[in-house]
Image (tube, coloured by chain):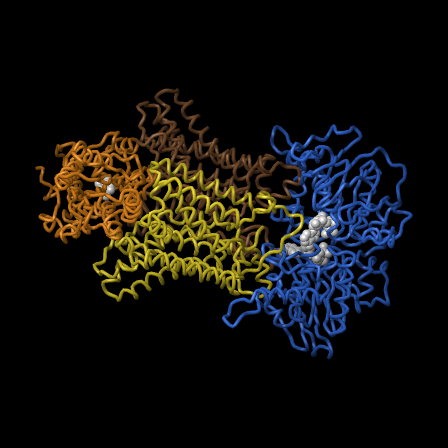
Chain colours: A orange, B blue, C brown, D yellow
Amino acid sequence: ACSGDDGGSGDDGSYTVGVANFTLGGPYFSGMDKAIAAQAAKKGNVEIVSTDANGDAAKLAANVEDLLSKNVDAIIISGGPLESAPAVLNSIKAAGKPVVLVDRKFATGEYTSWIGPDNEAIGRQNGEFLAQRLASGGKVGIIKGGPADNSIGLARTNGVKAALQGKPGIVLVEAPDFGGWSSDGGLTVMESLLATNADLKAVFCENDAMCLGAQRAVADAGKAQQIVIAGVDGQAEALKAILDGTNYLVTGLNDADIIGSMGLDRAVEILGGASVDKDTVVDSPRVTKDNAAQFLKDGEF
Amino acid sequence: MTVAAGSPRAGNVLELRGVRKEFGGVPVLHGVDLVGRPGEVVAVVGANGAGKSTLIKILAGALPMSGGEMWLDGARVEPRSPHDAHDLGIRTVYQELTLVPELTVTENLLLGNFPRRRTGLIDWPAAHAKAGRLLAEIGFGAVHPRAIAGRLTVARQQMVEIAKALVSEPRVLVLDEPSAVLAGTDLDSLFGLIRRLRDRGVLVIYVSHRLAEVLDLATSIVVIKDGRVVTTTEPARTSEDELIRLMAGRRLERIYPARRTGFGEPRLRVTGLSRPGEFTDVSFTVRAGEIVGMFGLVGSGRSELARCVFGAEPASTGEVRVGTESGSDTEQSGRTGATTFRSPTQAITAGLALVTEDRKRTGLVPELTVRDNIGLTTLYSTTRAGLLDVPRHRRAVDDLIARLDIRPAHCATMPVVRLSGGNQQKAVLAKWLLAGPRVLILDEPTRGVDMATRMSIYQMVDDLARDGLAVLLISSDLTEVLGATDRVLVMREGRITADLDAEHTTEDEVLGYSIGRAG
Amino acid sequence: MTGQLTDAGPEPAVEPGRRNRLTVAGRPVTVETGFLTLVVLALAVAALTSDAFLTQTNLTNLLKQMVTTGLLAFGMLVVILTGGIDLSVGSVVAFAGIVTAGLVSGLPLPLAMAVGIASGIAFGLVNGILVARFELAPFVVTLAALTTIRGLAFVYSEVPIAPEHPDFFWLGSAMLGPIPLTTVIMALVFLAGGLFLSRTPAGRSIIAIGGNAETVRLAGINVRRHVVLAYAISGACAGLAGVILASRVGIAQPSVGVAFELDAIAACVIGGASLAGGRGTARGTLGGVLILVLINNLLNLYDVQSFWQQVLKGVVIVVVIGVQRASRPRA
Amino acid sequence: MTGQLTDAGPEPAVEPGRRNRLTVAGRPVTVETGFLTLVVLALAVAALTSDAFLTQTNLTNLLKQMVTTGLLAFGMLVVILTGGIDLSVGSVVAFAGIVTAGLVSGLPLPLAMAVGIASGIAFGLVNGILVARFELAPFVVTLAALTTIRGLAFVYSEVPIAPEHPDFFWLGSAMLGPIPLTTVIMALVFLAGGLFLSRTPAGRSIIAIGGNAETVRLAGINVRRHVVLAYAISGACAGLAGVILASRVGIAQPSVGVAFELDAIAACVIGGASLAGGRGTARGTLGGVLILVLINNLLNLYDVQSFWQQVLKGVVIVVVIGVQRASRPRA
Ligand SMILES: Nc1ncnc2c1ncn2[C@@H]1O[C@H](COP(=O)(O)OP(=O)(O)OP(=O)(O)O)[C@@H](O)[C@H]1O
Ligand SMILES: Nc1ncnc2c1ncn2[C@@H]1O[C@H](COP(=O)(O)OP(=O)(O)OP(=O)(O)O)[C@@H](O)[C@H]1O
Ligand SMILES: O[C@@H]1[C@H](O)[C@H](O)CO[C@H]1O
Ligand SMILES: [Mg+2]
Ligand SMILES: [Mg+2]
């Protein structure tokens, strides 16, 4: 009954699911949006109405209100990098509709179900990899996405730190400025970091997009041999870089495709009356040169 | 549309036939005819709002005509843009200044005509030299080509405007009140220039409210009243009085009211006032009921002095007092050590009013209505329960509009920019009268104002003086200074060089003190 | 001097026939009527083409969605009238929100909110003083303020604050019948604000200052004080918007409000205000807000794909100001 | 009001009675010297207080980091001079970058880049025509363009494009000795641009238009064409910046460039340009860019935390324009 493939049986067998994206301005988020739509198309009886708040919490609230006035059956919120929106959740609840959170679990407020990664675990996994790699110690740079109010980045960085702190010879330096989760941001932050820390041995970024920019800065500085790179997400370009044997060594898979399609399935299950887990943590396998090919082939984003 | 029969008379450079213009259905010109031959100076005179500037803008291609014909050298033309008019050899100096304030004089003159190097780049040294030559040639050598236009006095800016029209020699030169802001030798340079151009065969169309100069310069005079030509005449066949009568449509007796006697207590006392680079150690007194004139050449520092007295700019030393009680209305200004008003607000509270010389920059808020402009000085004093008392405000303002005869009659809700120049000036005056001052400073108050209106302004100032107002009248118009005031202060290079009894001095004497000739 | 070709500054002395460009049945279409027609037309089209549009939920949504932009736009209008601009409002929204949320646990709710609004006023005063007293360009002053205040919001709290206090949500979700309380508050701001601009000496002075500050100064009006007042009003509105937004979302985030200033400015201009100062009305601005909110609402109701929504939103805005422009008499 | 500061330009005569507010050793501090002192002072403080500052890596970083803001700022300056503003540049950066990256696989690299830049010019032309021909407010036109073009960038590709083409990186990473090629390109733009503004009739006309458009029209110059040209130049600069940025990062992202316009505008104003038009120079703008990049660089070198960076950045900008303002003679 829990299998979503044959579709939930609604009153007339078909549903409309609203998707409230906080932003689509990043490959991860637009990948998520597409994955949800693709899964809906696969099912055939689910119609998707997708909205984009363009990074504006007020607009997210407005979009959800608009979805509710269009009388959608359920709402999926892809809320990264928003931390929380309790009143938005309340209004969905007041309308009596289920809400599924994907990727980002809101800190407060009531939701029906959440599907996402264990970010601390992803960070730890990266940290352990780097600890192994830098057995003789070295300086590790950390590039954060920012702005500060974001639990995901914090969890990832904390994970890395937890794994590396106390390891002999390991020194951690956090870049003072944020990379904004984007490649150009990662590039600039890395350039500045290199000016003050020429002796870096590794760099961890809270996502792959920033790492890809950082990788260029490292290459431009002629330090590709010296500095290795570790990211998060499994963005296609990062997977390629890992596969190609560059200094991009590792990432933690945080697959929007998987999370997105699971999110839609979950919404349909709920609509079908199934009782579901409240929280579902999606596995985040470590991706290195050895297994990168396997994730690249279906890499939509 | 009037269809003129036959081709225009041979020998005419310019011929206008039945030119009409309406603004939003309101007719302003009702079929104006005007003819000009090479080497003529055709003067166009008329009261404020008669339609002179409108006619000129049509000539300049800046306004389309609503009907009528324009012929140039025997060919029918219709300039659709200033560019077209340029190409036809028509150059215009507008009534309102049109310089680019941030740019140098050179650039304002040569915009669109820069001398260039072979590389195509502008040759600046050559450009400055060219501008300098041009200015010198036309007698305005005092204007520095590298000066920033916006920082020049209004008079100098006007010279640049005129020079701009002469960068290449026009066939028709149109001048809309070019003399309004000039005085003394600058005025002479302008007249000399016009005569030279005339002798070279240029047709000059000349608009002015100064009838003496019109009679002196013009070869023919077109009198416009309410958008119609009432007469076309020649200087030899008319007189100032007749022109005034034609323009106003009624007889006007005497220009200046009879002098008053028996002035009261000193109302404005300025003692040892200085501001470096502008004026030095200026002292004078204006008594209640007295009208004191202040004459001087361009740049002699009169306007700066007025602004300073009014608290619009700080003085470095000196004292300004309004009223008989010394210093009760003034406040020590810590910064300069001078006892003056620290802001116009203070000055106004003490009973001062200043009608500035540049109405466009400091007199009006162009987009606001006439009513709102006039009401500015009394905004905060016409309230009820914290809100503006709109009916009372409106009544007070509209009453003044009527009293000063600001035209058109329904102008109260029009943006003030749409008024003719002279009527804008009246609106500024109205604004200050509304404030109910005890001391009124007028800086060139009749600039661009027609004779009939001038007379009503003189009359009004006289009435106010009779009621005890003290008036300081700054003017570059000698006749006015002598006729409308009781006493004349002459200013030269920032100092008061003479204090003369208006009734017993002469134009020569005043002029002498102003240029440092007389003893 | 403003070298605008557009609606900047005092209109040139040379005035080609002041014809209105649009006429309907021979009568000129004024800004007001042209604009009103546009709003009514948009509403009619919306009602006819979308079933969801006229539902009560949706209309209530519309009313709610106007609040933030509306409050910011009114404050912005006052600043724009002086010839200035306030880019810092988005950051003030964040700051006021997070400070209020932070204080709610220790202070009574109304006091916490008052502090939030007061912080907006304080920032506005600083902006105003820098602009009026030190004669710095408003654009850059408030751009710098945007950066600094955003930074301060994060300094106050890096993480979002979601107060436990149940009343905290109240302001943002209370309804007066079918009308959200916040909309009523916004409407009151526009009402009082409209009165302020048209009927008080201070309001009229502010408008005149935008037309020609020097003239106003010489008329004995303290220009600086009025300019400072204008920025303070904008700060107050932004503060209020921040408090309301935090209450509406139920959480205050230091990162909220990015680019809010742009919608507020757009609303003013769509509503007929001139960025050169001296022209603009509260009523027009409210219309501008309504149009912006309608655009978003309709694009959502028509299920236009997100990126195409952005594409269309820009196009619609240009069309709207084009119609607006066409119904204003030519300069 | 200062005219242009460009050396080759028509130097204003020193006028009696206009005192500069700041004097040093009796000599007036002009905008130029005041500004130069500031830059030199900042550099000196930087060199003395941070070991890392004078390292070659850091100086090269500075040079690299100037490029995007620099290119955008020059184009912005030209628009600002006309009295306009171009808020769409950040979106053009994204669009030009993603289109170039998208085409590289099918077209020769130079052609792909040309298309990217051409797209910037095309957007600029549309902006310019809406402003000049239809007389719409530049702020709102380019704000709408910001939205629309950003949408189009996403429509072109939702996901980043990282071309395989190895040459794609070349432009962004090539060095001429210690100087990045991109910096050289930017310097050339400023050189040619400075010459354009100070020494060509078109450049002078653009400046004059910002001073008083009506006058320029009355002087028989086609104002509209020059305004369109100005926006096209801004579009071209933004297009070029987009292509360079994509090449530098190696990945073109449709989301790149948000708020870039703000830094570009700030650079112009810090460099002495007036947002009312008619005043500003290429040299000053370059100085403004340098100051902005220096602020960021130093805050990073001093390891100032991100939020405090924001707080300080705003404060420093206000101080800089304050000094700037104080060294300009009073109007
Ligand atoms: N753009 C306009 N719209 C409406 N009315 C206008 C406009 N321009 C001028 N007028 C009106 O046309 C009439 C003639 O104005 P014009 O400026 O031609 O007068 P003038 O003879 O030059 O007066 P002055 O001596 O005061 O300069 C005035 O009543 C004026 O208000
Ligand atoms: N062309 C000029 N260039 C530089 N400075 C000037 C120029 N003309 C005047 N000034 C300065 O401005 C000061 C005051 O000019 P102001 O306008 O007050 O004189 P004014 O007597 O009122 O002249 P006007 O008759 O033009 O009104 C002069 O003392 C002089 O220092
Ligand atoms: O998990 C996602 C991704 O890692 C993305 O790259 C940034 O935002 C987070 O929410
Ligand atoms: Mg006139
Ligand atoms: Mg004077």
The image position of residue B206, as x and y in percent, is 74, 64
Quick check: D144 above or below B6?
above
Q: How many marks?
A: 0
The image position of residue B488, as x and y in percent, is 84, 46
Write down which quadrant ligand 3 falls in. Answer: top left
- Quadrant in the picture for residue B324: top right
- Could one spot residue A10 in this view of the protein? no
Q: In the figure, is residue B264 to the left or right of A203? A: right
Which of the two residues, B464 or A292, is positioned nearer the viewer here? A292
Quick check: B91 above or below B427?
below
- Quadrant in the picture for residue B451: bottom right
Instruction: Work out which residue is located at the far right of the displayed protein and give it.
Output: B504
Q: In the figure, is residue D254 to the left or right of B151? A: left
The residue lying at 83 percent from left, 60 percent from top is B212
Which of the two residues, B222 or D16, is positioned nearer the viewer here? D16
The image position of residue D163, as x and y in percent, is 23, 58
The residue lying at 61 percent from left, 28 percent from top is B385
The image position of residue A271, as x and y in percent, is 17, 37
The residue lying at 69 percent from left, 68 percent from top is B173
Q: In the figure, is residue A146 to the left or right of D235? A: left
Split into 4 quadrants, where in the image is the N terminus of chain B? bottom right
Quick check: B27 above or below B473?
below
- Could one spot residue B327 in this view of the protein? yes
